[in-house]
Amino acid sequence: MKSSTRTILFAVIIGGLTLVIYYLAAVVRHEVESWNVPSAIVLTVIGLAAGAAWGARAELARWKTVDAILTANLALVFGLLFLGWGITIWKLASIPPLKASGLRDLFYGFWFIPAVVVPYIIRKPGAAVAAETLAAAAEWLAGGEWGLTLLISGLVQGGAAELVFAATGWTNYRLPVLMVAGTAAGVGSFVVDYLFWYSTLAPGVLAVMFVARLISGAILSGWLGKVLSDALAGTGVLSSFPIGREGQEAA
């Protein structure tokens, strides 16, 4: 079975099982609150992303050592940048008009950038979920204010982006695909945040937040991720990776 097919299949299976388990617990056994559509959607999306991460795990064993080292180093750097983003840009964007309206989420997409930058550089299955999860772990270890929920967010965001790359067979890294991957990570992040923090907000605010986060994911992770990666490749330090070889061939 092709690795891309396996990844998508695992995502569908785990997502479906998550939905079935929730249905059994809520409707059949009454072990949790009554059936709730938003909760069902949230849990299914988390299951899809987790399934994608699990489906891509076998590919990580085929990575070269240099791929793993680069991913770990970039994840550490981005994890520290995440921490800085949270205590500067995110705090500045938390003024009442932006926060109350949901427009603050226009600044959220930077937290998805490893799920675009690392896959774009090394072009390997599993890169999105590995980079995003490791970056979230680095932010948590550095004292990120959202605690262990960061690890769940990282896994789901990376898994959602991984599904986009898997759908192309990990062969298409053009700007539109990178922007869709950033958008997918935004969807994953939103459902996790809804589960933990946002379920009591007004529907109108949630709608604005959701759209703003998708736009931010496309721009701050998809477009900006490509710009930063291309700039780094232009220095020649990535000549041993696919993005560097691509630039040499173009020259």
Image: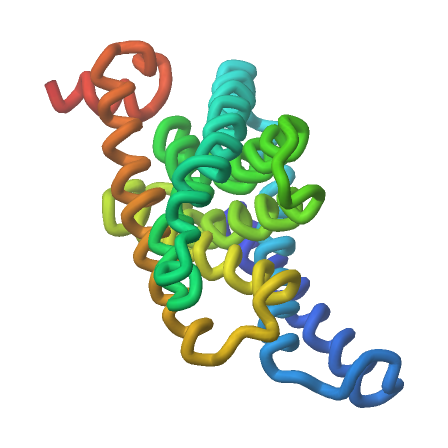
Q: Is residue 79 above or below residue 29?
A: above
Residue shown at 60% from the left, 69% from the top: 42
6 sits left or right of 243 in the view: right
Quadrant for residue 173, please give it.
top left
Please determine whether, in this image, residue 147 is positioned above or below residue 236.
below
User: In which image quadrant can residue 20 be found?
Assistant: bottom right
Vertically, is 18 above or below 141? below
Residue farthest to the front?
Answer: 96
Name the residue nearer the viewer: 218 or 84: 84
Q: How is the image coloured?
A: rainbow
Q: Residue 75, position in %: x, y?
A: 52, 27
Q: Is residue 112 visible?
A: no
From where the camera sits, is residue 29 visible? Answer: yes
Image check: 31 left or right of 58? right
Which residue is painted at 42% across and 60% down in the image? 99
Where does residue 153 sit, x and y in percent of width and height? 59, 49
Residue 200, percent from left and from top: 60, 75
At horizontal 32% and vertical 10% (from top left) the residue drawn is: 237
Query: Does 6 sit above or below residue 134?
Result: below
Between 46 and 33, the residue placed more toward the observer is 33
